[in-house]
Structure formats: C-alpha cells, structure tokens
Amino acid sequence: MNKMHLIIRQEYLNRVRKRSFIAMTLLMPFLFVALMSFPHWMSKINDTETHDIIVLDYTGSYKNLFTDTSQYRFYYRMTGEPTDNAEKVYAYIIISDNLLQNPKAIAIYSEKQISQNFKEDITLQAERYLENEKLESCQIPNIQEIIADLQIKLDIPEIRFGEDGTKNSSSAEISSVIGIACTFIIYMFLLLYGVQVMQSVTQEKSNRIVEVMISSVKPFELMMGKITAIGLAGFTQFVIWLILSVIILLSTTSQLSLGTATDNIESLNQMQNYPFAELLIWFTLFFSGGYMLYASLFAAIGSAVDNEADTQQFMTPITIIILFALYAGIYSAQNPEGPLAFWCSMIPFTSPIVMMVRIPFGIPLWEIIVSFLILGISALCSIWISGRIYRIGILMYGKKTSYTEIIKWIKYKG
C-alpha cells in the first residue's frame, strides 16, 4: 500500500502542476458566470434603428390600433399598395375588413423577413385592441373596470414539513435548479475524468512505460493509484471552481439584476431553508461512488486496447448509459417520486446522476441510503472485475481485444 500511496501522490502532483490544469481551474468559473450572464445582458440590448410601418386600413376603423415604440413607428393610410416605396418601409400591415367579424382580414407584407418579436408584438396589440372593442360593444357601464376587478392573481407559497414537524418555505423551481445543476456536474465529471483515466492508461501502455512500473508495483495497486489520483485532482478542481464561482456571482449579482429586490429576497429566504451541508455530503458520496464505478471500467478499457482509436467499441455502451442517466435525471426533476426517478436512482449505473436530482425535493432518507449502498457494492464489484482485466490486458500487445477475450481474462485464475 505504500507504493500505491506514492503512485497517488506522484500522479496527483503531475496533474495539478500542469499549466493546462491551472488555466482551466482559474478560467472556467469566469466562463461559467459569463455564460450565465451573457444571454441576460444580450436581452437588454435593443435594436437602436427605428423602423417605419405603414398600416393600410381600407376600412378606416383602426386609426389607433397600434402604438409607436422606440423601434417601430406606425403610419396610417386608407389607400395605396404594399409595393409603394417598399425599400424604405420595414413592413406593411393590410386591414381589409372588420376584424371582429373577419379575424383573417389582416396580413403583414414585407420585402425582408420580419422578426418574430415584431409579429408577436403586432399580434398582442391587435388582440388587446379588439378585446376592448368587443367589451365596449356590450353596452354595460364600466365593464372594463368590472372585469379588471374580477381578475385575481395568486402567489401561492410552498411550505414543506420537516421530519421534526417544523415548517419551512420551499420552492419547486429552486429545487429543480439545484438538482439539475448537481446532475450536470456529476455527469460532466464522470465522463471527463473517466476518459482521462482511460487515456492515461492507454498512453502508458502504448509507450511501454507500464512494463517498467509493473516490475515494482502490482497491477491492481497501479490501477487504483491512478484512479484515486485523477479523482482527487478532479475533486480539487471542482472545489476551486465552486469557491471562485460563488465569489464571482456574489460580486456581480447587483450588476446582473436578475430580478426585483423583492424576488431576490424571497429567493434568498427560500434557499436558506435548504440543507446545503447535507446536500454537499450526499453529493460527495454519490460523486465518489459513481466515479469509482465508471473510472474502474474506463481503466479496464484502457488496459485492454493498444491505442485510443480502439477504445470506441468498448466506450460506446458506457457513454450511452451515462447519457441515458443524464436524460433520466432531467425528466426526473418534473416527477421526482415517479417510477422512472425511483428505479433509475436505485440502478447503480444511473443512481449517481438521478439521485442528485431527487435529494433537493426531500425524498425519504431510506431511499438515499439504499441507493448509496447499492452503488458502493457495485463500485467494489466493478473495481474487482476491472482489476482482473487490468492485470492481464496491461501487458497484452498486438492483438485485437474482443468481449469474449475480456470474459476469459475475468475468469482466469492466477
């Protein structure tokens, strides 16, 4: 075990000292925050150009149908054709009949393709105008005020009972965001660092470095040392990303202006009731179990082939399973108590991803414990099987490996 400790230490230091590792660790939080804030920032940038819209109202009844905005100015005419001076006009709106009697008597003509926002704005203004016109035709005094008084908007709070009988405000939206965020993080790390384990094993095998290493350390210790070191490097990177992301988000919250002050305060109050410490513990456990499960399989794949080009036939089934787990996790956020969510959180190949979606919704503790026990036992079995493949495959050269050959390696006694 002392030799495995040295392998872990050396492999870990070699990775965290790389310039690429340091650069990605420091730059990724800024990129993450930029990706979050860029769409919001872009949505505030409006087209500064003002477009002229000609409304050809052949009925003469809709002089106040549309309201001018900073982007669109409306000019009303009762005669003319949509081809007149078309190059200088953004669009023509043709009204040929009474819209209450014939809703299809309105159309938009343009030389260039109009934007979706423009069409939605025109449609909304026309609908509101016609609704008011229809209400006025009912000849009931103050009918608009009466209807406005009848409109009711509810903001229903969500209260969740604790195991000790306490009541805490909660939010399905916040639970979904937290769960899906944890799901994407685990998915990304399982695939990213699992592939790194496979590539590292394949490179050492193709360079014949492993032959020298095997002479002084057991194959199983070498495999476990490599898996553990890469996992620790990944976890180190994740912790740094988390800390930097929180710092950057807190320092830019006022600039992002993602909601009103009341909404932000309410969201903060709801998030304070979430057991983030408990969530972090379970995240670490399921991340570790899922990583050991998949990393051992990737290590076995890397030892069974001579180069990275030959890994595709073995990687495809694992990649499909991980992708299925991701989609199952996303859909489980809509129904965390459903059969898809429950069974996928119990199956060890999908539980690390799916269970992290369900935990923020406050599922029973026994389900989490059973899921983790199944995952832990499966990870140990995967490590044992991968170790038997690794000890033989790491020294095999010049031969195409098949699934039948791998099964023989597992059964081989020696």
Image: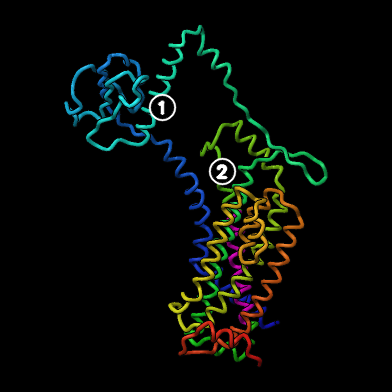
Amino acid type at image mark 1: Leu
Q: Is residue 11 above or below residue 102?
A: below
Q: Which residues are magenta?
A: 222-242
Q: Is residue 207 above or below residue 114?
A: below
User: Of discs 2 and 1, which sits in the foreground?
Assistant: 1
Toward which corner of the image does residue 65 lie, by quadrant?
top left
Q: Assign the magenta stretch its main secondary structure.
A: helix
The residue sitting at 72% across, 38% down in the picture is 159
In the image: residue 368, left or right of residue 291: right
Quarter placement of the C terminus? bottom right
Q: Which residue is mark 1?
A: 124
State the image coordinates of residue 146 (x, y, percent, origin top left): 55, 13
SS under mark 1: helix
Does the magenta run of residues contain 235?
A: yes
The residue sitting at 62% across, 57% down in the picture is 354
State the image coordinates of residue 158 (x, y, percent, origin top left): 69, 37
Q: Nearer the viewer, residue 123 or 97?
A: 97
State the image coordinates of residue 350 (x, y, percent, origin top left): 61, 63
**In terms of sequence position, does the residue under pointer 2 or pointer 1 come before the other?**
1
Specify the color scheme.
rainbow
Toward which corner of the image does residue 273 lie, by quadrant?
top right
| Residue at far front of view | 101
SS under mark 2: helix
| Residue at far right of view | 164
Q: Is residue 289 above or below residue 283?
A: below
Amino acid type at image mark 2: Ser
Q: Is residue 178 above or below residue 407?
A: above
Q: Which residue is mark 2?
A: 251
At label 2, counting other C-alpha atoms closer than 10 Å, the crowd grade (few under 14, some 14-19, many 20 or more) is few
Q: Nearer the viewer, residue 228 or 79?
A: 79
